[in-house]
Image (spheres, rainbow, N blue to C red):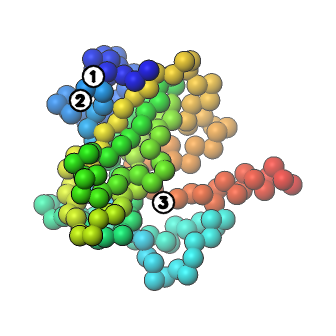
Amino acid sequence: MLLSDKSIREAIAQKRIRVEPFEPSHIQPSSIDIRLDKKFLVFKHADHPYIDLRKSNDDLTTPIEITGDKPFILHPGEFVLGSTFETVTLPSDLAAMIEGKSSLGRLGILIHSTAGFISPGWSGKLTLEISNVAKLPVTLYYLMKIGQISFVQMTTAAERPYGSKDLGSKYYGSEGAVASKAYADFKTISKKVD
């Protein structure tokens, strides 16, 4: 069941959903608008011939921070990691979904490739997988509305919400854009195979 604006307000008042900082005017009929933070991870394409998913790729990106009213210019075909300005915390019985704003989608800006789902128990800023599929560069500004989060009531609370010690929650408590930790999945696979 998708939460309505009234249900979202109630869940925030009861502190079941936390969006910090919270702007009441950002509540839409079935979602909350979220804003773009000022830090990005930009891929260093020339430094790597390929990406090996079994190895840490911490050196694959360079951190960039925009200041003041200076925009981040996203070029056609470019893919960067950004994050939400807001920190989002969910209880164990609510999941959420993040989607881009339709006004940005109409300009060719996508904010996630596959990671649009937010697990119950999540807490942290959300990493955005931002790409420009248009033919012209687009300016992105600090604190601009970048997306919206909708909330789904689960049938029961999750037995192992995101952040549980035995779950291997790689991104729990994120404070900004976080590079891929896909290599950690291979460690789990090799332990099971041995």
Query: Going 32% across and 46% down the picture, which residue do you hit?
Result: 100
Local SS, label 3? loop
Contact check, label 3 and label 1, Cβ < 8 Å: no
> What kind of residue is marked 2?
Ile
94 displayed left or right of 190: left
Mark 1 residue type = Asp
Q: Looking at the picture, how far across and down is residue 109, in whole percent?
A: 30, 57
Foreground: disc 3 or disc 1: 1
Mark with earlier residue (3, 1): 1
Residue occupied by mark 2: 27
SS of the residue under disc 1: helix
* Disc 3 from disc 1: Cα separation: 33 Å
Q: Identify the residue position indicated by label 3 in the image.
A: 179
Determine whether 149 is above or below 56 in the image. above
Q: Position of residue 98 (x, y in %)?
A: 38, 41
Q: Of helix, strand and loop, which one carries label 2?
A: loop
Place of residue 144 in the rendered image (x, y in percent of width and height, measured from the top left): 20, 50
Image quadrant for the C terminus? bottom right
| Residue found 78% across the figure and 56% down from its top | 190
- Three-letter amino acid code of the residue under disc 3: Ala
Q: Position of residue 174 (x, y in %)?
A: 44, 47
* Farthest residue, direction left: 69
Label 3 Cα neighbours within 10 Å, binned few <14 / some 14-19 / many ≥20: many
Provide the residue designation for mark 1.
5
